[in-house]
Amino acid sequence: MGGTPVVEMRNIVKRFPGVLANDHVNFAAYPSKIHAILGENGAGKSTLMNILSGLYRPDSGEIRLFGERVNLKSPRDAISRGVGMVHQHFMLVETQTVTENVILGLDVPRFFLNTRQSEEQVAELAKRYGLDVDPSARIWQLSVGEQQRVEILKILYRGAKILILDEPTAVLTPQETDELFVTLRQMAAQGHAIIFISHKLGEVMAIADHITVLRRGRVVGEVDPKETTKANLARMMVGREVLFHLEKPPLEPGKPVLEVQDVHAMGDKGVPALKGVTLEVHEREILGIAGVAGNGQRELAEVVTGMRRCTDGKVLVRGEDLTNKGPLAFIKAGVGHIPEDRTAEGAIGGLSLMDNLILKSYREEPGGFLNYKKIRKRAEKLVKEFDVQAPAVDTLARVLSGGNLQKLILAREISADPAILVAVHPTQGLDVGATESVRRSLLDQRARGCAVLLISEDLDEVMQLSDRIAVIYEGEIMNIIPAAGADRNEIGLMMAGTRVEA
């Protein structure tokens, strides 16, 4: 790339029990440049950046920062040498102000806090980098995009010249993503080295000056985004051709399968999470729910699968009133569920693949006795059909990668021939190959006549797969619009709370 690198990672090796996460990885980052790291699940990109930010220590290899060989023992050690990382899940104290969060944990001031002086320093820093945020506002008062700016301010305030951002757009609206990209370019222009971890190829192509691709712990390529394509990047990541735009033939929707009528529900914090939600999902239809995280999507999914009680309104499945009847009633009515948290809610890690595949159907065994010969045969068929990469059906679910665990859950839910499939963030955190497989499965269910309720924070996914799109904001449906011809900016405005008549 020319110039002197501010980061050099040479022959980095990192092992975990049974896994070689980084296999002699070489990586360099340069000042005033935005570097993207791409790779499928388990490729080793997060491990590599956790080493650079001081969270992990390599088994072998060396790190040089600004030309000097360093031994990073902790994140505090890394930040003292100019390296800061913004994690996907923010680490902010909601009841404190922006300024208090920015200076939290610093040695200065030690005893007496000069609030006005600190706020002025934070305001000046925010202005310099175009990070528009009120230093005196409390975190709970801020949007997700503003909270992310606070995380960036925290590491800039500590003098970071090398910024690592892990999936920074996962929780942002399209408008907030555009604003973040302006900020990153501004920081790069002022001499910072930006390292950007993302699975969204379009964003990487738009923002990066240089791309490093990892596969199975090794660097398989370094490319200039101006000299490559999304298809080529995907091929490098997973080792085969990947289809980005799956064929979605037009289908005539049938009868309503799921009816949600003026539903109200409380969230875990005891405040209203759903405020009069009304929608229908029909046979041969995918209804996508678009919204920024934390606007009622999780509560909606739980209400329509019997996992959360609603305080008012009705939930009907194929005309039967199942309001507040519990998960078993919904399972018996033909409701399939791909939950948001695949490890905590979707599967039991300590059970085998075979046992996980019968978690919902074991009650149907005649006489109440399990026929394990028959169960094994069926499990082997499903594992093969859904391409779950595992040594055997006796393998424990907890050893599967995220993509393979999601395929296992899909196999269980889809093999039950559901009338409606509630899919919550079905491709979140998955690489492009696993994402293609999951999306194809959802479209296959639509073609079979199943109704699909798709809840996703990936707006591209919602727009590509859905027949209609419902936009949710603070527990209310802002509008339900046809996906064909939907305007991305208008959806983004509704995701931020503006009512737009499409």
Image (cartoon, rainbow, N blue to C red):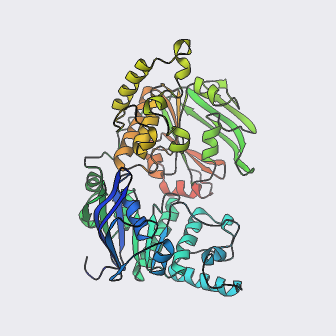
Q: Position of residue 376 (x, y in %)?
A: 40, 23
Left or right of 408: which side holds 297? right
Q: Residue at x 49, y 57 (%)?
A: 170
Left or right of 238: which side holds 195? right
Q: Quadrant of residue 228?
A: bottom left
Q: Position of residue 387 (x, y in %)?
A: 34, 35
Q: Quadrant of residue 498?
A: bottom right
Q: Position of residue 331 (x, y in %)?
A: 58, 27
* Front in this rendered view, residue 136 or 472: 136
* Residue 246 in view in this figure: yes
* Front in this rendered view, residue 401 or 326: 401
* Residue 485 in view in this figure: no
Left or right of 100: which side holds 80? left
Q: Please, which residue is most extreme toward the top here? A: 367
Q: Position of residue 5 (x, y in %)?
A: 31, 79
Quadrant (top left, top right, bottom left, bottom right) of the N terminus? bottom left
Total marks in image:
0
Q: Quadrant of residue 8?
A: bottom left
Instruction: Look at the picture and state if 429 lies above or below 126.
Output: above
